[in-house]
C-alpha cells in the first residue's frame, strides 16, 4: 500500500501530545529508572486502585468473600489479558517479569478491602460518581495504549521474523484479548463469585463493553496506521489490490498518533460508561440498604412479639 502522510502532520499540538503522553504514563512516584526511590508507576497505581475498587463494589452487593478469594479475583481481572496473550504467544507471563507489579496490585486491594475504618473505599464512594469516572477514564487511556502498543505492536514489531507477526488474525485476537482478558476469564470460570463454576461464556449471547472497546481500538489502530497491506502480505489473493485501494481511503496516522487517539477514545467511552454505572450502582446500594433495614425491623418486631407471648404465658401459668 503506498505510504501517505499523517492527517495530523500539520497539527503540531496533537503531535506534541502524542509524544508527551507515553512519557507521562511511564512516570513514577519518586524518581525514574533504576535509581527511583519509589519505582512504582503512577498510572499503574491508578489502574490497580480502579480494579480493586470495582471488585470491592461487586462483592459489596453480592456478599463478601474470604480475603484471599477476593484478592485472587482482583489479580485475575488485573492481569487476565496479559496472562491469556502470553499463553497464546508462548511468552513468559509479564507479571512474573517485574518485582513490583504483584505487590502493588495486592497492596491496592488490601487497602481497598481491609483499610482501618474502610477509609479508602468509603472515600471513593463519597466522591462517586467523580471517582468512578476519573478512574475509568485513566483505565481507558491505559487500555487504549495497551491494546495498540503492547498488543498489536507486540505481535507486529517485537515478534517480527516469526510467522505470527504476519497474521492479521493474531493482531486482532491479541489486541482484543489483552484489553478484555480478565473479564473473559471471569465470564468462563466465575472467579468473582463465591462458588467458582465452568459455564458457557455469556459473551456469546451479549458481548461485553470491554470486548467491544478493545476490539474496536485494535481494528481502528490497524486501519489508521495502514499497517496491513493485502498486496504485500497476501499477494496471491485475487481481491488484494481492490481491498488495498479501499483501505487507502482510511485517514492515515503515525503509530504514535494512533496510540494517542486510541487511548483518548477508550478513555471517553469507559468514562461515560462509568458515569452510567455509578448511578445504577448507587440505586442498587440504596435498595440493598433499605432491604437490610426492613429485614432488621421485621426481626425486631418478631422478637418483640415473642417476648410479649412469653409474658402472657407467664401470667397464665401463675
Image (cartoon, rainbow, N blue to C red):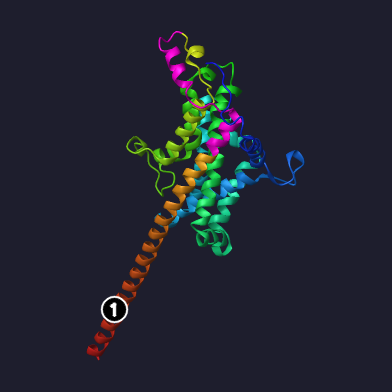
Q: In the rendered image of this protein, does residue 173 appear above or below residue 38? A: above
- Count every numbered label the image shows and give the total: 1
Residue 5 vertical position relative to residue 142 in the rendered view, above or below: above
Q: Please tell me whether residue 252 belongs to the stretch shown in magenta.
A: yes
The location of residue 202, given as percent across then percent down, is 35, 39
Q: Magenta region, mostly helix, strand or loop? A: helix
Q: Residue at x 52, y 19 (%)?
A: 164
Q: 199 or 182: which is nearer to us?
A: 182
The outermost residue toward the front is: 10
The foreground one among 115 and 257 is 257
Q: Is residue 35 left or right of residue 171?
A: right
Q: Which residues are magenta?
A: 236-263
**Front residue of this view, candidates 103 and 305:** 103
Residue placed furthest toward the left = 316
The percent coordinates of residue 89 (x first, y second) are: 53, 25
Q: Position of residue 153 (x, y in %)?
A: 57, 27
User: What is the quadrant of the C terminus in the image?
Assistant: bottom left
- Find disc 1 in the rendering and name its residue: 306
Q: Is residue 259 above or below residue 78?
A: above
Q: Within the image, what quadrant is residue 3 found in?
A: top right
Amino acid at each position: 500500500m503506498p505510504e501517505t502522510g499523517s492527517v495530523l502532520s500539520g497539527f503540531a499540538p496533537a503531535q506534541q501530545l502524542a509524544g508527551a503522553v507515553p512519557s507521562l504514563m511511564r512516570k513514577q512516584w519518586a524518581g525514574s529508572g533504576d535509581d527511583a526511590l519509589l519505582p512504582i508507576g503512577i498510572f499503574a497505581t491508578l489502574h490497580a486502585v480502579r480494579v480493586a475498587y470495582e471488585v470491592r463494589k461487586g462483592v459489596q452487593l453480592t456478599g463478601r468473600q474470604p480475603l484471599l478469594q477476593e484478592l485472587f479475583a482482583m489479580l485475575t481481572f488485573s492481569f487476565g489479558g496479559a496472562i491469556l496473550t502470553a499463553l497464546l504467544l508462548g511468552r513468559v507471563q509479564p507479571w512474573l517479569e517485574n518485582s513490583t507489579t504483584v505487590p502493588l496490585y495486592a497492596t491496592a486491594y488490601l487497602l481497598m478491602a481491609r483499610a482501618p475504618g474502610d477509609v479508602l473505599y468509603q472515600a471513593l464512594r463519597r466522591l462517586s460518581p467523580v471517582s468512578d469516572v476519573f478512574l475509568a477514564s485513566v483505565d481507558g487511556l491505559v487500555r487504549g495504549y495497551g491494546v495498540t502498543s503492547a498488543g498489536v505492536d507486540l505481535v507486529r514489531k517485537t515478534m517480527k521474523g516469526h510467522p505470527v507477526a504476519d497474521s492479521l488474525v493474531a493482531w486482532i485476537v491479541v489486541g482484543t484479548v489483552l484489553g478484555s482478558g480478565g473479564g473473559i476469564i471471569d465470564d468462563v470460570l466465575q472467579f468473582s463469585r463465591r462458588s467458582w463454576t465452568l459455564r458457557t461464556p455469556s459473551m456469546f449471547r451479549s458481548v461485553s463493553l470491554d470486548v467491544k472497546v478493545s476490539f474496536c481500538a485494535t481494528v481502528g489502530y490497524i486501519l489508521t496506521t495502514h499497517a496491513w497491506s493485502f498486496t504485500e502480505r497476501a499477494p496471491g489473493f485475487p481481491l488484494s489490490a481492490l481491498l488495498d485501494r479501499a483501505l487507502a481511503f482510511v485517514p492515515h496516522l503515525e503509530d504514535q498518533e494512533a496510540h494517542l487517539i486510541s487511548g483518548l477514545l477508550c478513555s471517553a467511552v469507559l468514562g461515560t460508561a462509568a458515569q452510567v454505572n455509578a448511578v445504577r450502582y448507587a440505586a442498587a446500594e440504596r435498595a440493598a440498604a433499605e432491604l437490610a433495614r426492613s429485614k432488621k425491623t421485621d426481626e425486631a418486631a418478631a422478637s418483640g412479639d415473642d417476648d410479649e407471648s412469653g409474658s402472657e404465658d407467664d401470667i397464665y401459668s401463675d
